[in-house]
Image (tube, grey):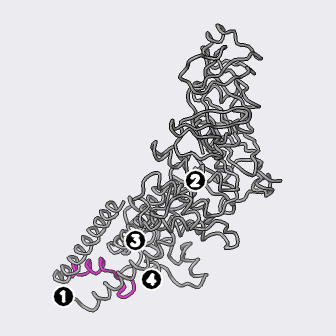
Amino acid sequence: MPPLAPDDWLALWLTLKLAGVTTLLLLCVATPLAWWLAYTRRWYAPVVSALVALPLVLPPTVLGFYLLVLMGPQGALGMLFQTLGLGRLSFTFGGLVLGSMLFSLPFAVQPIRNAFESIGRRPLEVAASLRAAPLDRFFSVALPLARPGFLTAIILAFAHTVGEFGVVLMLGGNISGETRVLSIAIYNHVEAMEYTAAHWLAGGMVLFAFLVLLGLYLLGNKFRVAR
Amino acid sequence: MSGIYAHFVLRHSGFELDAGFDAPARGVTALFGPSGSGKTTVLRCLAGLERASGQLQVNGEIWQSDAVFVPPHRRAVGYVFQEASLFPHLSVRENLLYGYRRIPAAERRVQLDQVVEWLGLVALIERRDPNSLSGGERQRVAIARALLTSPRLLLMDEPLSALDGPSKQEILAYLETLHCELDIPVVYVTHAMEEVTRLADHLVYLQQGRVKVAGALLPMLSQPDSPLAKFEEAAVVIEVSVGALDEPYQLARLDFSGGALWVTAADLTVGRQLRARVQARDVSITLQPPQASSINNILPATIVALAEAGSARMNVQLLTGANVMLLARITRRSCDTLGLMPGMAVYAQIKTVALAV
């Protein structure tokens, strides 16, 4: 049994919950967005693409800072949530989910978009000529054909959320059971010179990240062989 | 109103389509023309996959007008694409049933067993992976899949162009059978003269987005100045029936009104109706009947019209039998040497006759 305090277990659970919820919600947002980006011919599509990709290049602190401003009691998003009676956003789990979604958005959108683009229009036109309505075409043709893209998106979004630090620190702070995720817990242990606990958590993260990437590449091989 | 009335106007960068035509409610209408003439675009407009302005009426139903645009999945069309485009994630059977399951049971006039038999798919239907099929097999599955939606209009976009020679002949034979079995209109895009002469009943000739000529195929083929007669493979089609067989010599006599042709025959039966295709370059003209010739078919004929086919050659339209037209492709020098003129009585020597079921 690793020498971890109940607080650390809580952080682990919170991390998994955050990554799970974020990934799930992200799929709902990223799928239509990826679909639109893959098929649209509007002139402003590159603008949207660039905005979606922004979290890839911005320091998490910049993203976190603006989100904090937006989600604060005086921020637009914060006020909206207050008026809707959904409660506070900053320094809460809900705020973290929103921040993580934005932070991991490109990791979910890009693989799904690539998958849709590689399918092309032809299978959908075939389905249309075989009487499938638009939504039917999406579920019976586009979704199954884009499955590898979805798997990649799920894995990347989940893993990226697990590894998040900067945005969480800016947005959620360090509240045990509410916003203290693994990366923050490791930071705390290091600050307090508790290297054994830090090793256990950090080592676990390394192993997890390696396994995820290994799984991703094995998956890639499998799909390439099947093709 | 039965049949198809269509008129589409579309402007892309560098391409302008303004094509209107009628097609009858039965039989195959070939959309024929050089590449880039807009054939496929017209077909996509018929299916609703491309949105042009214009009108489309199919058997009295309005599919497109200024106020109406029926989306593709609500049009009773079967569409066969150039590549078979089978769904790779579905088995052969699931591919076949994809459209069938999506139409109301009451509208299913074509059944799986029927189509599987027509297109020779019995051995293929249990295959898991459509990618394991050959090109010709895949295209047959695609045709069957389209037919299983019980379409009121079948659209085919060069269904043979992606296939090799043998598969092409195999599918052509299946299409000829379908031609007889189906009572729905077929619009068939092609740039191959052979496919036109074997399959089509009507022809719409497109050039640079416009309809140059349109009408019944047979009279159009024998017009010496039509765009079709300018082709290297220009040919006429004669509807014939097998009149007699010469078994020792493996020959068959094909009768048409007022005349007959002898051809080398494999497994023909007397009384069978066929299409005989005679290429213009296989027909030559003599003024006297040749005394000793290896050519089997020498028909008395009258010159109806002459037209230039390029700078060195002429098309000569000949009337033989009761009302059968032939086309002969000869050099301009021969034409002048023989002094050919409309109304002259001559003999047409036919070197080869191709048969289509």
Residue B12 appearing in the image: no
Residue at numbered disc 3:
A154
Task: Please identify, in this view, whether the residue under mark 1 or under mark 2 is nearer the observer.
Answer: 2
Of the numbered discs 3 and 4, the one sitting upstream in the chain is: 4
Residue at the (73%, 26%) spot, across then down: B319
Residue type marked 4: Thr
The residue most toward the left is A196
Q: How many dots with numbers?
A: 4
Residue A102 rendering spot, x and y as whole percentages = 45, 68
Q: Quadrant of residue B295?
A: top right
Does the segment drawn in magenta span residue A177?
yes
Q: CA distance from mark 3 to mark 4?
A: 24 Å
Depth order, front residue of B140/A180: B140
Q: CA distance from mark 3 to mark 2?
A: 36 Å
Label 4: which secondary element: loop
Depth order, front residue of B306/B68: B306
Pointer 2 chain: B
Residue at numbered disc 4:
A92
Pointer 1 chain: A
Image quadrant in which the C terminus of chain B is located: top right
Whether pointer 3 and pointer 1 mark residues with C-beta atoms closer than 8 Å, the reply is no
| Marks 3 and 1 share the same chain | yes
Whether pointer 4 and pointer 2 mark residues with C-beta atoms closer than 8 Å, the reply is no
Res. A84 mark: none
Q: Which span of residues is magenta-colored? A: A174-192
| Marks 1 and 4 share the same chain | yes
Residue A218 appearing in the image: yes
Residue at numbered disc 1:
A2
